[in-house]
Image (cartoon, helix red, strand yellow):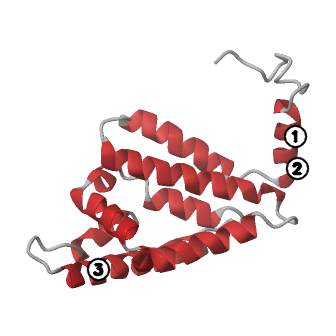
Amino acid sequence: MSIAALEGKMFRPDAPIEEIEQDVESMIVELVHELGRVAEADPNPVGAEERAYIQAFSDARANSDRNQAALLATAISRPNLAESLLYLNRRLDREDLAPDEPVGIIGIIVRLAMDGLWVSDILDDTRFNQREREKITSLLTGLTYLTDDRLNAVLADIAPGGDAARGGSQGQKR
């Protein structure tokens, strides 16, 4: 699923603002439901919601469509229309920041990165070619499979004084 699957429900050129608002709210509610369905179908529940989010916002063509810009503008000017998505993100953030979920911070990083990629596509859909975009989304997807132990090892490695900070075996030239 991607945002493109939902855009046919939006924005007749001559539509009154009330209709546009209703379409925006409907689209966001459907997106939230679809994210839930995709996450539930994932055989690995850890990181499933983030992988669904990546999948939904990975299509540059759909992201750069003018309806997406209108969606973003409408959601900014009328945040109440995006209430279901805001609620979903707040719930996921609370869960991901829970002390018993050390790797949960990855979920927040992934969602913020995909939000940024979505806005970047709206502003400039030529910024990344397909290969570059796949590199970005593959890295983000890979992060969703990190375990608490692996994340702690990576954090120790990249901390000041860690192996990577000293230019050790994991530290590579950028």
As drawn, 164 above or below 38: above
Residue beneath disc 2: 149
What residue appears at the point 50 percent right and 79 percent down from the top-left corner? 84
Closest to the observer: 145 or 164? 164
The dot on residue 136 is: none
Residue beneath disc 3: 21
What residue appears at the point 38 percent right and 63 percent down from the top-left corner? 2
Instruction: From the top left corner, tell me how far across and down residue 102 is, in percent.
Output: 83, 57
Residue beneath disc 1: 153
Instruction: From the top left corner, tell me how far across and down residue 117 is, in percent.
Output: 45, 47
Cα separation, mark 3 vs mark 1, equals: 47 Å
Residue 25 visible (yes or no): yes
Instruction: From the top left corner, tell me how far across and down residue 20 is, in percent.
Output: 23, 78
Cα separation, mark 2 vs mark 3, equals: 45 Å
Closest to the observer: 131 or 6? 6
What residue appears at the point 47 percent right and 58 percent down from the top-left corner? 55
Circles 1 and 2 in contact, beta carbons < 8 Å = yes
